[in-house]
Amino acid sequence: MTAPKFALPVLIAAALCAGAAYAQAPARAPTMQALADCRAITDPQARLACYDKAAAAMIAAEAQGDLVTMDREQRRAMRRQAFGFNMPSFSLFDRGDRPEEVDRVTARVARAYLQGDGKWSLELEDGALWVQTESATLGRRPKDGSTVEIRKAAMGSYFINIDGQRAIRAKRVK
């Protein structure tokens, strides 16, 4: 069976369109692309061999730290853990997901201490470190185990309520 004369130009046009669409999409990791490429193989044994090889390469890349995989819940946890840092947009955490805007978090204080300038430093149980940025005083001293609610404020600043007290301005430093 011979291919029609117009088949080659159609294939070239399709490849160019696919290439343009791929150029706009986020780049896929080579090990993931190798797995995706296996789908095009028509021979069942060759396709299975391709999948086995690609899966082994992905597992090895993940074990060596060259490839990181995350499910939707892990991406949400990463966005929550990064709350308070002014970072560029990490659209890779949003892929296939309409990310919720994290505008407040609630946590517990692991350690609270007063700095030499009279401002509080709060180490949270998740390892985050928040430092008071204004001179306001608190009615009650924060202590280990205190509950804090941190919320976004205007122009990239944050408010922290400690055990329901009046909010103070703070910034995340770690």
Image (cartoon, helix red, strand yellow):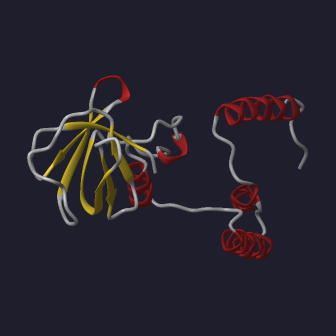
Q: What residue lies at 74% left-to-right and 62% top-to-bottom? A: 38
Q: What residue lies at 50% left-to-right and 45% top-to-bottom? A: 95
Quarter of the view holding residue 6 = top right
Relative placement, left or right, of 79 versus 125 is right
Q: What residue lies at 78% left-to-right and 69% top-to-bottom? A: 43
Quarter of the view holding residue 168 = top left
Q: Between residues 156 and 73, which one lies in front from this camera angle? A: 156
Q: Position of residue 172 (x, y in %)?
A: 40, 44
Q: Position of residue 169 (x, y in %)?
A: 26, 35
Q: Is residue 12 above or below residue 161?
A: above
Q: Position of residue 39 (x, y in %)?
A: 70, 60
Q: Between residues 104 and 44, which one lies in front from this camera angle? A: 104
Can you name the residue that lies furthest to the top here?
155
Q: Is residue 55 above or below residue 26?
A: below
Relative placement, left or right, of 42 versus 104 is right
Q: How many numbered callouts? A: 0
Quarter of the view holding residue 104 = top left
Q: Position of residue 110 (x, y in %)?
A: 29, 65
Q: What residue lies at 29% left-to-right and 43% top-to-bottom? A: 119
